[in-house]
Amino acid sequence: QVQLVESGGGLVQPGGSLRLSCAASRSIFTFNTMGWYRQAPGKERELVASITSGGDTHYADSVKGRFTISSANAKNTVDLQMYSLKPEDTAVYYCNARTILIGREYSYWGQGTQVTVSS
């Protein structure tokens, strides 16, 4: 069973920064894609940023230029560095890992970490 543990959330003022970290219980090389999603109250969960095992990254338009996703293979972690935070970035942030095995996709989720952007 894969475990993903997020850390780094908290309360920050608008314009501030936070770094989220997701620690996986096994080598992140075994995942095709890892990503960060977020869910604000009353809204659907949305993709924030993702990174493939080959290092390709993808960002939601709303965070481009402000957020950076990176992986540290030796530590089995995927981080999300967030700058210039806005109140609309307030949400629970979830780490996700996906792998495809014999034509079947497996998706794993962390428990989430709260990010609140408020003055």
Image (spheres, grey):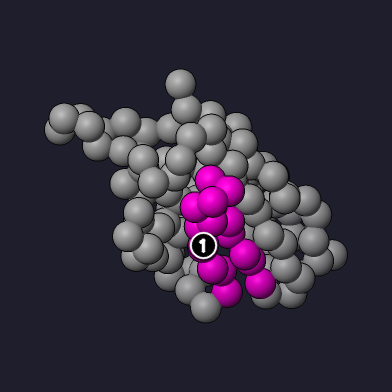
Image quadrant occupied by the C terminus:
bottom right
- Reading the image, the residue beneath label 1 is 70
Image coordinates of residue 48 in percent, x first then y, are: 48, 57
What type is the residue that disc 1 sits on?
Ser
SS of the residue under disc 1: strand
Q: Is residue 47 left or right of residue 112?
A: left
Q: Is residue 101 left or right of residue 81?
A: left
Whether residue 45 is visible here, answered yes or no, is no
Closer to us: 108 or 44? 108
Is 75 magenta? The answer is yes
Whether residue 84 is visible here, answered yes or no, is yes
Q: Residue 98 falls in which quadrant of the image?
A: top left
Which residue extends farthest front?
74
Which residue extends farthest right?
119
Label 1: few (<14), some (14–19) or many (≥20) C-alpha neighbours in 10 Å: some
Closer to us: 3 or 38? 3
Identified at 54% across, 56% down, the residue is: 72
Which residue extends farthest top?
1
Identified at 53% across, 46% down, the residue is: 76
Image coordinates of residue 33 in percent, x first then y, are: 36, 49
Identified at 54% across, 51% down, the residue is: 74
Is 38 magenta? The answer is no
Identified at 67% across, 74% down, the residue is: 84
Which residue extends farthest left?
103
Q: Is residue 65 left or right of residue 91?
A: left
- Report the span colored magenta: 66-83
Classify 119 as above or below 2.
below
Image coordinates of residue 87 in percent, x first then y, are: 69, 63
Image coordinates of residue 95 in percent, x first then y, are: 52, 43
